Amino acid sequence: MKISQFDRDQKGYFKASDGEQRGGLMTYTWAGDDRVIIDHTEVNSAFKGRGVGKQMVLAAVEFARAKGISIVPLCPFAKAIFDKNEDIRDVL
């Protein structure tokens, strides 16, 4: 599964893909210069149960760490991933 990031102006997203198939999409909105809000996560039904959503959240964590920014997980799925994984809460 390949995770790609697209960032433009005040919004962006992480896209999971397997070849030509889109596995999932996670969108975010910038809140100032040092914070992003994850507002939606969706996984293609053919990819459910394969950890695609979690991979996108982890990609966002790596992005936040590299940029020195924080994440606000408004999306219930993303919030659940943060709740279950203490080792990624440093970006909250």
Image (tube, helix red, strand yellow):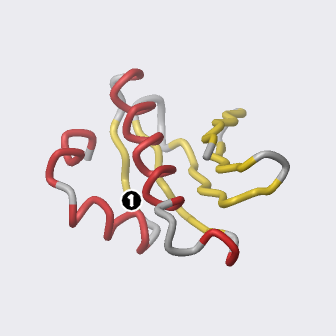
33, above or below 86, in the image: above
- The residue tagged 1 is 73
Q: At 47% across and 40% down in the image, what residue appears?
A: 59
| Residue 8 quadrant | top right
What percent of the width, then of the height, locates residue 64? 39, 33
Q: Is residue 13 left or right of residue 65?
A: right
The residue type indicated by label 1 comes to Pro
Which residue sits at x=48%, y=44%? 31
In the displayed structure, does residue 77 sit left or right of residue 25? left
Q: Helix, strand or loop at disc 1? A: strand
Asked whether 40 or 18 is in front, the reply is 18
Say above or below: 11 vs 54: above
Locate residue 65: give its quadrant.
top left
Depth order, front residue of 75/31: 75
Give residue 45's position: percent from left, percent from top: 68, 78
* Residue drawn at x 57%, y 74% as measured from the top left: 48
Q: Residue furthest right?
A: 20
Q: Residue furthest left?
A: 86
Across and down, in percent, residue 46 comes to 69, 74
Residue drawn at (33%, 24%) of the image: 68
Is 48 located above or below residue 59 in the figure?
below
